[in-house]
Amino acid sequence: MRIVVDLNRCQGYAQCVPLAPDVLQLSGEEALMYDPNPDDAQRLLVLRAAASCPVQAIIVDRLDESKGQKP
């Protein structure tokens, strides 16, 4: 799983932070820091955090789950 936070769109509301605290953290009052490649065990928490963003600044990219399979 890969996530991207559009920091131009992010307004620092931080509604996402308590939902995925191991992946998303506030640095200072408004700067969001994040792990761009969180462990798959965090998937549900990250998806909930992304859904909670009022400006939809968090994009979750589900990496190819069929790795190792031939087309």
Image (tube, helix red, strand yellow):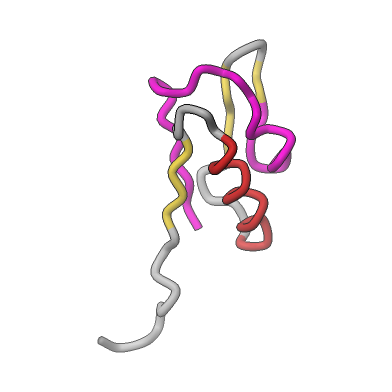
> Which residue sits furthest top?
29
Q: Residue at x 65, y 42 (%)?
A: 23
**Near-viewer residue (24 or 37):** 24
State the residue at coordinates (59%, 37%): 52
Q: Residue 19: x and y, percent?
A: 71, 41
The residue at 36%/87% (across/down) is 69
* Residue 24 coordinates in the image, percent (x, y): 64, 35
Would residue 63 be counted in the magenta stretch?
no
Question: Residue 7 in the image: x percent, y percent?
Answer: 44, 24
Q: Position of residue 14 (x, y in %)?
A: 64, 25
Q: Nearer the viewer, residue 50 or 5?
A: 50
Q: Is residue 11 magenta?
A: yes
Q: State which quadrant residue 64 falls in.
A: bottom left
Q: Residue at x 57, y 24 (%)?
A: 32
Q: Give the magenta range.
A: 1-25
Question: Compared with residue 58, is residue 41 higher up or lower down, i.e. above or below?
Answer: below
